[in-house]
Structures are given as C-alpha cells and as structure tokens.
Image (spheres, helix red, strand yellow):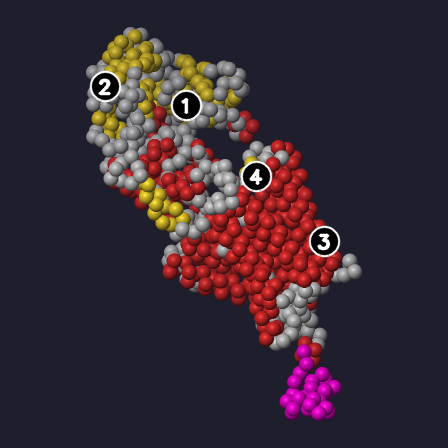
Amino acid sequence: MSDSGFILEDDGSYTINNKSYISKDAVYGDYECADRGLLLPIFSEYTWPPEVRAFLYFMGLLYCFLGVAIIADIFMGSIEKITSKTRKVYLTSEKEDEPEVIEVRIWSDAVANLTLMALGSSAPEILLSIIEIIGNDFRAGDLGPGTIVGSAAFNLFIISAVCVMFIPKGEIRRIKDIKVFAVTTVFSVVAYLWLLIIVVAVSPGVVEVWEAVVTLVMFPSLVLIAWLAEKNFFGVPNKTDTSKQIELGNFQPADKFLRERQYFRDGRLDRDGLVAFIKEVKNYPGLTDEDAAVLAASKLVESQSHSRMWYRVGAVRSMTGGRKTQPQLSYKLKERSKDRLKTLIMLEDGTNQVYNAMNEHPEAPTVGEVPQVQPHKNAIVDFHSASCAVMENIGKFQVAICRTGRIDTRVSVRVETIDGTATVDQDYIGINEIITFEANEREKFIDVEIINDNQWEPDEEFFLKISLLMDPEKREGVQLGRISIMEITILNDDEPGIVMFQKRGFLVKESIGNAVIPVVRKNGADGEITVKWRTIDKSAVSGRDFTGGEGLLTFKHTETLQNIEIPIIDDMTPEKDEHFEVELFDPEGGAKLGQINRTAVTITNDDDFNSFLSNMMQMTNANVHALQVHHETYLSQIKDALNVNGGDIENATCMDYILHFLTFGWKIIFALVPPPGILGGWLCFFVSLGVIGLLTAIVGDLASIFGCLVGLKDGVTAITFVALGTSLPDTFASKAAAVQEKYADNAVGNVTGSNSVNVFLGLGLPWLIAAIVHVIRDEPFEVKKGNLGFSVGLFTGLSILCIGIILARRFLGVFGKAELGGPATPRYASGIVMMSLWMVYVLFSSFQQYDYFK
C-alpha cells in the first residue's frame, strides 16, 4: 500500500482511498474489441464467436449506411427547400400595363453549393470526425481523418472516372462555370497541402489553436472567393448564354421529341406555355389529356435548374425503393404507339364497324381495338377495304391484300377465315394460308370461295383476318395495318349499286385529328366503280380549320364501304362551332349517286376551352407536386414512407419492392422528422442533422469494432468501407447529373468544392474544439503525423495528377475538348487511369498503416 492509498489486487482490481475500482483489462479480458465503441455494444456479446460478431457488425454497417442515406435524403430535402427560395424580378415587356415577371433564386449557386449543399453531402464524414474526437476525450483518432481523406479520394478519382466514361456515346459535357471550378480546385489542393504542412512541418505531430483557426477560416474564404468568381469579379465573362436564370434544361429520352423546345419560362407553369406544349403533344395522337399532363409536369420539372443535391436525393431514393424525383412514364404511355388515332369521339367508319361487330358478336372471338401502325419502321400489311359483298353464286373471287410502309424486305403473314353468321363448309370454304410479299411487291390476292346451297337465306357475313406468324424472326419488320379484319357479306344482288354518305351530318371535336367520313355502296356491289369528292367551305375554312380539297374514291369489285379522311386543325383556342360540307360527284363504272350525296361536318370546341385548360393546369400541378424533392406535410411524408415507390405502384419494379422492404424500418422512424414544409425547412434541417449525428456515431462504432474483429486498423477501415459507404450515393447522383445535364458542373464541378469543405469543416472544426480543450488542460493536442501525413501527401500528389487529366481533357482535341465524354478510346483510357489512382492510394495507404514503408 502506498501513501496515496492505492492498493493493487491480484485479480486486476485496485483500491484508492477505500474505494474499489476495476481495471479496463479486468472488465473486458477476452471480450475482444468490446472497448472500441462509444455506444456499442449495447449488451454482452462475450459468448458470441468472433466470426459471427464480425458478420453481424458488417451487415449492421451496411444497413446503417442505408439509414444514413435515407435520413440524408430528408436532410437534403430541407436544404433544397431552403435554397430554392426565389424573388420576383420585373422586366419591361411589349404590353405596357403588364411587365414581364421572372423569378430568380435568392441563394447564389456557388454559395449554396459550398455551404448547405456541401454540408448535406458531407455531413456523415464531418459529424463522424467530430463525434470521434469528442468520444475519445478530445484526443485525435484515425477513423475520422481517414474517412475525410478516403472520401475525398473516392470522390475525385472514382466519381470523376464514372462520369467521364458513362456519358452517352458521341456526347460531351464541359464545365460551364470554369472560374468557380478553378477556385474550388485550387482550394482543394491548398487544403490538403495545408493539412500536410501543419501535421508534418510547422508543428510535427501537434495541432495548435492558430493552425485549427486558419483551417476553419479557409471555409468562409473559399465561399467568398467562389461567389466573387461567380459574379465575374476576376475578369472575362464566361462564354456561355445568359439563360441560367430561366434555364430550361434537357428533356428525358422518352420525350426527346420535345427536348429542345422551350415552353415553361423560369420553370413555372403558365397558361401560354401550357397551351403551346399541348399543341405540340397533340401532334402525337397516341397521347391522352392525362398523358399530356404527365409530360407537361415532366417538362416543367426538367425546365427548372437542379442542383447536385437534387440528383443525390434521386440516387438515394432509387437505392431505397422510394419515390423517384425523375419523371416516370407509365407502362401504358411507354408502350402506346404515337401513331394510334385518337378515339375521344370515334366515328362510325368501316374498320371500327368490323371490329365492333366481331367484338360484340356472341360467336366471334374478341379482337380488341384497331391495330396501331408504324409505317416509318415496318412493312404494313392490311386489306384494301374493310368490307365487301358478293353474290352467293359467285363461286370464287379474289380479295386484295396490300403492303405499304417499308417495301424493301420480304415479309409473310397468315390469312384465315372466322365465322360470323355464315359458317365454314356450309356457306364458304375456310382459309388458313401464309401469304408472302417479296421485296418491292405491294399487292397480293387470295381466292375466297362461296358455297351456293340453292336455299334462300338472309344476308350472312364472315370475316377474313390477317395475323403475324408465330416465329419471332418472321414477325420482325412487319406490322398489321388498320384494316387487318375484313367483313365479307353474302348477297343476292349483282348490280353496281349506288354510292352515298352514311349520314347527312357528322359531329367531330376539334381535337379528333382526322375526321373519317364513311361512304357506302348499296343495292349492288358488282364490278369496280369510282366517285369523286370535294370539300366546300362554310363557316369552317380550309387551311384554317381543316385541310380540305378533293379526291377520288375507288370501290373494287364487291367492296361496299370506303372512307374519306379530312384532317381537322386544332388551334387550341376557344371559338364557336363551325362546319363545312363534303360533296360526292361524278360516279363512274355504272354506279349512281344516292340520296345523301352531300354531308355537313360540324367542328365543335372540346367542351369549354377554359374549363379544359383549367383542368389541364390542375392535373399538371398535381403531377409536379408529386415530383417534388421535399415534403410539405407529415401526411405526404408518412405516405411516402409506407408505400413502395412513394405510392406509384404502377411504375414500381421488383427491385423497388425488395429495397422498400429492406429499408422500411428506417423510413418509418425517419418519417417522424418534421417535414421541410414546416418553418421554411429550417426545423427539418436541424432535427435531421441531429439524427445524422446519432446514426453516424453508431456507424463509427460499427466500423471500428468490425475492423478490429477482422484485423483491420481504423485508418484502413476508414479509407475503404466507411469512405465507400458514405460516398456511394454521390457516385450515382453524379452519374445521373452527367448523363442528364447539359454541363458537367453538377457531375464533377462540385467534387473539388466538397473535398475542400471536408477538410475545412470535417477537420478544422473538431481540431479547433480539441485544441482549445487541450490548451485549457495545459497540454498539447497531438495528432499522429505518420499515417495521416503519408495518406494526405499521397492523396495530394495523386489529386494533382487527376486534376491535370481533367484539365487536359478540356483543352485537347483528342479528348473532345471536354471534361466528360468524347471519343471512346481516350475517355475509357482516362477513366481507367483515374480508377487506378484510387487503387494506388488505397493500396499504399494501407501498406503505410501496417508499417511496410518503415
């Protein structure tokens, strides 16, 4: 026993002033790695095999990475809400009493990117470094600094390589704001050089208060200089257009026909822009009003300028089966042909009569809607007419099968008969044949035989059907036309007949596309006849309300119906009902005109135009709201958390369901965080930041204990598992931004800025706190210079080489004079070199951790 009252017992315990204490070694003993965590382990794992513990900690680490990504999604939603605030700017316009109003963001892009957005992207790394120092009694550890440098290496080398290589073929992306990029690049190099200087040179192994202060002060200096560069304080303006404040962005591949068109100025929905957009999409008749509203919302979202944060949120939600930020077209909309005729008001033309007759006939199979055609891609095969009539005693007659569209290939189709009221082998001879069109052959004929049973019967009908062959190879390049079903009526009349309109008047909507006017042949169908037609202007005028003219209709032998198609012009403006007339004249071939040789076509407005437009704006706004990054209310936030793909079940994939199931627990917990719509996003900002801090502390414990169990040092665990886990969402986000943006700024332009912020905040802030604490304790704040100095020095050298490659790509023609994309061989070569730099960094830094270079 000493004078101080200290007694050391044989079991490792000791007594001081009659108070018993147990040493750390006595508590843990063989309980391997149990002392490495701040919060973990929660309960005793003493009896668990080390292999089982290592596996569980590894799986827990991966699961917590998903949790960090999900809460970071909410955190960045609050940042997006905060930085998206705008103010109105009034400009002069052509209308004296109505000035032009645009909205510009209050937050500068450079300031937003380097402050809140950089914090949102780097929050886990920064908080991990702060928590580690506080948890270690304000002593420096390896996990925090290692994660800072390891994440910087992954971001610069791997993310840059991915963005360089995965640009669509033949495209390039250049950094638009090169001066801001230059500032952040210089600061990123200076940051790590400064880190190397203070750790190795100025005060080796010790960080003094002034050094930490300088490190932290570099952060506002970076923000200020970047803002000045953005405002063109340092010289020549950027050689880019000035449409940034009303930038419209790119449209998605599914809507590439609208890619370069500008409809919504400043990313806001307005009446004129919506009308112009709807006029355009109505040129593609396969789209309904609901589809147009979805596309308008998609275009509106795409027309808004997006930050890298927006792409990161989208990447996180794709990884967790959440609601997508990118517009999703429904399966029906994707699969529907753009050339399908609108059916808002379907006229009773012959083709639809045949299809309706077959669909409604109790003994005939259901054949569905009129087939869709794509003449610019495929050979189109159909009948010349939708129906024909023949005498019962005709015996055999020929039916024409026509080919249009592509005619330079050899195609085959099957022709078969289908019973109607006439039955096979009693009224006609069945057909099931393959018809082959050779290249450049436009017409084939098939023989149809009618059975004369010498008994009186009412008129009967059966059907001829064209179908594609079952062999997939023979189905390629051929498609059925609109008249793939033909009705054959057995008559007792052998007269040429009379021709006339089916009705005295037709009512069509302005949005119908083509008005289809049926012309029928009655009282006989023998021989080929022709009849001319012409349009007559009334209140509707050709060229303004419809495309008129004149033409010739041909009825071949036995054909009883033909259609006149007249394009209707939809000017999307409210107006009264208008009409024009169509007249038949000059029949030839023995036919005569019937009683209805003139018909009126009335063009009606699509309901009330203002009501229609208001409905479209409401649907578009609803779709836009569904694509917002952040939530305005608890209800929408909880609904998104409970449902796969945010409730968009129709577009949810199998992988979405799996990821939603795996992350459901995190989503429910984090749904309780106040949504960004409350208090302008600030409440959500601070609450989610606190949750990220708590989860980051758990990640640090998991990583440290896992590394200990598998024999990895904290420094190695940091630059590999932790750095990769925290940076993976940024990788997907940068790739999406690289593919979809016109410029490379949101893909790689922000990487250097983020790396700088990591040092200034992730090391400057915790080191300043720790240095002050150690000054109070009257002892130096020690930082091991060996491993950290080597890692920082190696990264600095490799980063200069990587930045040199990026700049060389911008100025050398062999790379396409762009940071991203360009010719295949040079871009893949540069991408592989960048990835190799990361492998060199990880390998050599790991060797240093295990003293291979001593």
Disc 1 element: strand
Residue at position x 62%, y 32% in the image: 813
Left or right: 765 with respect to 841? Answer: left
Indicate the secondary structure of the residue bearing disc 4.
loop
Identified at 63% across, 76% down, the residue is 778
Q: Is residue 776 visible?
A: yes
Q: Is residue 562 above or below residue 356?
A: above
Q: Which residues are magenta?
A: 1-24
Crowd tier of the residue under label 4, counting other residues whose Cα lies within 10 Å: few below 14, some 14–19, many 20 or above: many
Mark 2 or 1 closer to N-term? Answer: 1
Task: Indicate the quadrant where residue 545 lies.
Answer: top left
Which residue in the protein does label 1 denote? 464
Give the side of residue 818 with respect to residue 348, left or right.
right
Element on which disc 3 rests: helix
Task: Say which quadrant the C terminus sits in.
Answer: bottom right
Q: Earlier in the sequence, mark 2 or mark 3?
A: 2
* CB atoms of marks 4 and 2 within 8 Å: no
**Residue 537 image label:** 2
| Residue of label 3 | 843
Q: Earlier in the sequence, mark 4 or mark 3?
A: 4
In the rendered image, residue 273 lying in the magenta stretch gets the answer: no
| Residue that numbered label 4 is attached to | 167
Kindly state the secondary structure of the residue where label 2 is placed: loop
Inter-mark Cα distance, 1 to 4: 51 Å
Residue 5 forms part of the magenta stretch: yes
Give amino acid for label 3.
Leu
Q: CA distance from mark 2 to mark 1?
A: 39 Å
